[in-house]
Amino acid sequence: MPRPLQLNQTAPFAVRDGALRIGERLTMARKRRRLTLRELAAKAGISYDTARAVEAGNLQTGLGAYLAMLWAMGLESEIQAFADPERDEEGKQLELTRLPQRVRHRKERLDDEF
């Protein structure tokens, strides 16, 4: 029998805190829409227990459940903004440091046929 995952206990603080914040934000969005957790779970196509785990920030809950809840509340644009490469300032800077200093084109052989 496989050992149960221990991610909730072993994850770095920033990861646990981020999951809790996402759960809190989803809870707030749900309440603003005057939806019960059961209604949202049904609309998202997930179980009540899964929806409850999402709002609790459980790290062992699949990403699909988070995305389904966002979709069910009409927050698809937030899905598109998630890990957007255009917002990755550090990645952009690293890419710039790796750009070549100059670009060379290979010399093409000239064909002597006219």
Image (tube, rainbow, N blue to C red):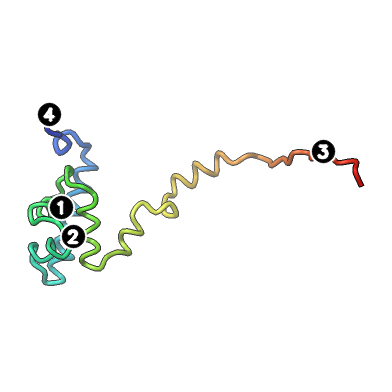
Instruction: Using a 10 Å C-alpha cutoff, classify the residue at mark 4 as few (fewer than 14 neighbours), some (14 to 19) or many (20 or more).
Output: few
Q: Residues within 10 Å of mark 3 (few under 14, many from 20)?
A: few
| SS class, disc 2 | helix
Q: Residue at (19%, 43%) from the top-left corner?
A: 16
Question: Cα distance, mark 4 to mark 3?
Answer: 63 Å
Q: Which mark is residue 26?
A: 2
First reached walking from the N terminus: tag 3 or tag 2: 2
Disc 1 and disc 3: Cα gap in Å? 62 Å
Callout 2 amino acid? Leu
Structural distance between the alpha carbons of marks 1 and 4: 22 Å
**Residue 59 location, x and y as percent?**
18, 44
Callouts 3 and 2 close, C-beta under 8 Å:
no
Give the spatial CA distance, label 3 vs label 2. Answer: 62 Å
Q: Which residue is mark 1?
A: 54
| Side (left or right) of 4 relative to 91 | left
Can you tell which of label 4 and label 2 is closer to the viewer? 4
Residue type at mark 4: give it. Answer: Arg
Q: Position of residue 44 (x, y in %)?
A: 18, 61
Q: Are the residues flagged by discs 4 and 3 in contact, CB closer than 8 Å? A: no
